[in-house]
Amino acid sequence: NGKVWILMGSYFSLNCVALSYVALYLGRFGLQDYTIGIIVSVSAILGFILQAIVGHIIDTNPKWYWRNLLMVLALLELIISVLIFICHQINVPVPAIAVLYGIFILITWGMLPLVNTPSFYYTAHGRPVNFGVARGIGSLVFAAVSYMVGFFSEEIGIEFIPICAVFFSVILD
């Protein structure tokens, strides 16, 4: 149960940074709410496709264990988060930052089936997991991270958002 709780907390920390702070982060670069909405919508639609692909890979290819694929996606999240931070620091054009943030959201959505899989995997192998408690812990961590990121984004600046993404990507990996 503990491993699944940590996984849920780590994932929903990353999810919080990706989805709850996209408007604040991209809005500070001058993007309109409408444009940010398009970025989130396209990322969610592509995330739906990525989730289907990830699920298919895990279900049909024994070489890709759910944990290995989750590590690959977490590594991609880490790379994207670092790129977002660097782009912010060196004044890369806003459309490039927006695309990177969209990819960040996309990968976050793509991880969801891999985060849910361990509960069923461990239960099927004789180690029952209380999925409701695990998801509840994810929600509690989401709430705490949301407060923390909001507070420090106000105190330090929006560059704190990709720093958090880097941190939570490392924890998830």
Image (tube, rainbow, N blue to C red):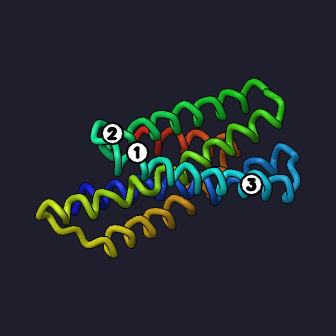
- Label 2 or label 3, whichever lies nearer to me, is 2
- Name the residue located 38 percent from the left edge and 40 percent from the top edge: 69
Instruction: Tell which of 173 and 49 is nearer to you.
Output: 49
Which mark is on residue 57?
1
Q: Is residue 72 left or right of residue 17?
A: left
Crowding near the residue tagged with mark 2, few <14, some 14–19, many ≥20 C-alpha atoms within 10 Å? some
Query: Residue 119, percent across and down?
Result: 28, 63
Callout 3 secondary element: helix
Q: Is residue 157 left or right of residue 95?
A: left
Which residue is identified by label 3?
24
Q: Is residue 168 left or right of residue 98?
A: left
Which residue is identified by label 2?
64
Rounded to the nearest angstrom, the CA distance separating label 2 from label 1 is: 7 Å
Question: Which residue reaches farthest bottom?
Answer: 132
- Label 3 or label 1, whichever lies nearer to me, is 1
Pick whichever of labels 2 and 3 is earlier in the sequence.
Answer: 3
Pick whichever of labels 3 and 1 is earlier in the sequence.
Answer: 3
User: Could you tell me if the residues under marks 3 and 1 are in contact, i.e. CB atoms within 8 Å?
Assistant: no
User: Could you tell me if the residues under marks 2 and 1 are in contact, i.e. CB atoms within 8 Å?
Assistant: yes
